[in-house]
Image: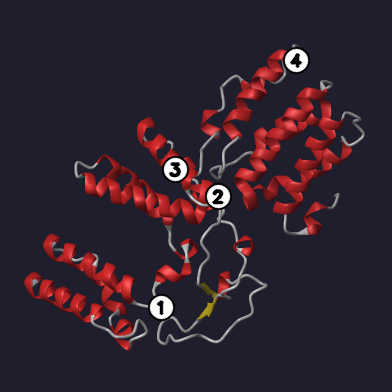
Amino acid sequence: SWKARLEGYEEAIKLFVTQTSDKSPIFNEYLGLIKKAVVDSNAVAQDKSLDMVLTYLTNAACAPKLFGAKVIPIKNFIKSLLKLLDDRDPSIRNEVKCLIIEIYRWIGSAIKPQLSILRPVVLNELEAEFTAISLSKPVPERYLKSQRPKDIPQAADVGCSGPFTNETSNANNMDTGEVMAFDPYEMADPVDMLSKIPSDFYEKLNEKKWQDRRDAMECIEKLTNVVRLAQGDYSDLIKALLKVISKDTNVMLVALAAKIVCHIARGLRKKFSPYAAHTIHVCLDKFKEKKSNVVLSLREAVDISVKVCCDILYLTYD
């Protein structure tokens, strides 16, 4: 019954706080209970289970808190978390703010796009807190083997047995600057820009007035200038942009087209690879252009195309 589970959670809390060592085998014995407890079907028991989980994480030495933000799927719960900022209970709102600030300490500005939906007054409060945070980022005390920085030797596991023995300890004197930066791409939601392309875009791209062609591409530049783009068929768009790069006599439009291609490549990453070879060939052919701003844009498009295209043989001419 839920009452029996409630009593069990209370007993577990007492057991955790009375352990004389944070490396007690008790913590490993109760590890399997943690995941099951938080989804308890009874609201009263579930509330107590969350207290138990908090007590566990506070007192156990080999807790997930040692591994930093990389092992926590922040993106999966951030939207639900932001909704709690409108909760009637001020204590809940305050705890949520504290958690958001702690997330910011770990992942930095990668969280800011997610905060754009907040009310201005709340966003300003958080921005003020972010500014007051020390520039030095926290460092994970332990790493999963798959995430261990190359310059940190694999050390023997210290004082922990059980489910955490496959992880690696962090060197205590590690420079925070050596910590792998959190990738904003992992936090961003894919944006479907293809459905937002104006119906007359391709028609305007063939207009005689360069101003009309510029206006058409500036609209696309805004749509593609996002962190992450949704997967889709970009063939027609890429083909049109590369035509501008290769054929248009206005160097400003050539540079703008190359800039948009860069946005798309960054937003798609590996999914841009089908378009990488053609992009590189067209841009290389245009390197004869003498305007420095055009050359820089073309070079950037080539660089990012090479980066997303894994197979060098795929880049060769037919």
Residue 10, image quadrant: bottom left
| 1 or 3: tag closer to the N-terminus | 1
Instruction: Name the residue tied to disc 2.
Output: 185
**Which residue: 57% across, 72% down?**
146
Q: Residues within 10 Å of mark 3 (few under 14, many from 20)?
A: some
Determine whether, in the image, residue 229 is placed left or right of residue 250: left
Pair 2/4: label in front:
2
Amino acid at dot 1: Cys
Q: Quadrant of residue 261?
A: top right
- The local secondary structure at tag 1 comes to loop
Question: Dot 4 corresponds to which residue?
Answer: 210
Gap in angstroms between the C-alphas marked 2 and 3: 12 Å
Q: Secondary structure at mark 2?
A: helix
Q: If the image is split into quadrants, where does the N terminus sit?
A: bottom left
Asked which secondary structure carries label 4, the reply is helix
Instruction: Report, in whole angstroms, how far the alpha carbon at label 2 lies from the one at label 4.
Output: 34 Å
Q: Are marks 1 and 4 in contact (CB under 8 Å)?
A: no
Q: Give residue 114's mark.
A: 3
